[in-house]
Amino acid sequence: MNLKKLSIASVSAVALIASIAPTYAASMDDLVAAAKKEGQLTVIALPHDWCGYAGVIDGFKKKYPEITVNELNPDAGSGDEIEAIKANKGNTGPQAPDVIDVGLSFGPTAKADGLIQPYKVSTWDQIPASAKDADGFWYGDYYGVLSMLVNADIVKTVPKDWADLQADEYKNAVALAGDPRVANQAIQAVYAAGLSASGGDASKAAAAGLDFFKKLNGKGNFVPVIGKAAPLAQGATPIVLTWDYNALAWRDGFSGNPKAEVVIPASGVVAGVYIQAISAFAPHPNSAKLWMEYLYSDEGQLGWLAGYCHPIRFDALAKAGSIPADLLKKLPDPALYAKAVFPTLDEQNASKEVITKQWDSVVGANVQ
């Protein structure tokens, strides 16, 4: 997707923010004191079973008990997070998010629209240059790959690749873990299916993905509800297309009832980086900065890893010997990720533009 054309007013706003040198981590003592004085942090779209966020949020609360964590709409998608910032520009109340965790493609547009502010955490240099905005407006936090979580008690033939999902035996079985018109996870799943269908041609993946889901919907295999752990366990959506870290965490949560399998597809293995950013209108900017410092500390990064996400500082942590051996043993076989493709920012923007705008006209399934 090309960056939106900006009005004169929005260009002025972007220019004003861009003219401010990115803020680096100040004295931690001063930052902690300022955050405690604010006394609150408002987050949005952080399900507790996503990427180990239950433990991460709990860790922050234990470290800074003086700061109340206000959690908004845990099931929101990346697009919803952006809209929440827009809708609360002049609001300092509890509905205004301080921070966001969104798909990579949402970072540049949020910056261009003047919706986020720059801040560089103390571990900034350990974040790969390809996964962060040079000016500090947004920065990668973790990544995973698209997978299939299958209720093996119901689905007798476990699919191995995207094309398998078109088989008649998967009628009323397949669900996306989000609305592809707004949720990054669902957008990337459509892209991944299309990448497989197009033989790996990134330029055709979005259109091919829409065609794939059009056929899946036409056959009656697609279930137009947002797939989660509970409906999968109950059999309402016995196959859910979701990030591997979600699938692995949900599988563990089932404790064998139902029996569940996590499938990394044979082709179209798409890796997705999510990013963090601070709202330009954050009511609690110091708490937001302290939250970022925690997320990018060893403790915060290992919290994500415990939730099966690959934290952005993984290589630095591994090199320093900072990853507990028992945690490493729990992670999937690295060989499963050998075919993983990391779409470029341009490829993600282009596919997002096509999928979000053409889903209704091509697929015609109202996911909710």
Image (spheres, helix red, strand yellow):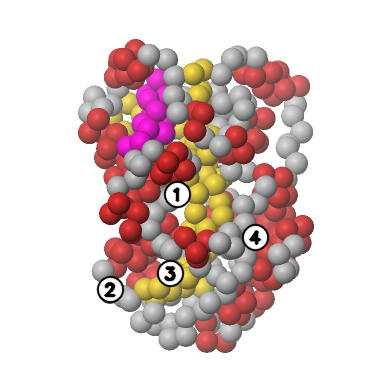
Mark earlier in primary sequence (4, 1): 4
Give the label, 1 or 2, closer to the camera: 1
- Circle 3 — which element? strand
Residue 361 location, quadrant? bottom right
Give the label, 3 or 1, closer to the camera: 1
Q: Identify which residue is drawn at 40% across, 73% down.
A: 261
Q: CA distance from mark 4 to mark 1?
A: 21 Å
Q: Left or right: 366 with respect to 229?
A: right
In this view, 127 is above or below 154? above
Q: Left or right: 275 with respect to 251?
A: right
Q: CA distance from mark 1 to mark 2?
A: 25 Å
Give the label, 3 or 4, closer to the camera: 3
Q: Which residue is mark 2?
A: 256
Magenta stretch, main secondary structure, is helix
Look at the image and say whether residue 366 sits in the magenta stretch: no
Q: CA distance from mark 3 to mark 4?
A: 19 Å
Mark earlier in primary sequence (3, 1): 3
**Magenta residues, start to end:** 286-300
Q: CA distance from mark 4 to mark 2?
A: 31 Å
Asked if marks 2 and 3 touch (Cβ < 8 Å), the reply is no
Mark earlier in primary sequence (1, 2): 2
Amino acid under disc 1: His
Q: Is residue 91 visible?
A: no
In the rendering, which numbered label is found on residue 262? 3
Q: Which residue is mark 1?
A: 310
Asked if marks 4 and 1 touch (Cβ < 8 Å), the reply is no
Q: Which residue is mark 4?
A: 191
Amino acid under disc 3: Val
Q: Residues within 10 Å of mark 3 (few under 14, many from 20)?
A: many
- Circle 4 — which element? helix
Asked if marks 1 and 2 touch (Cβ < 8 Å), the reply is no
Q: Residues within 10 Å of mark 1 (few under 14, many from 20)?
A: many
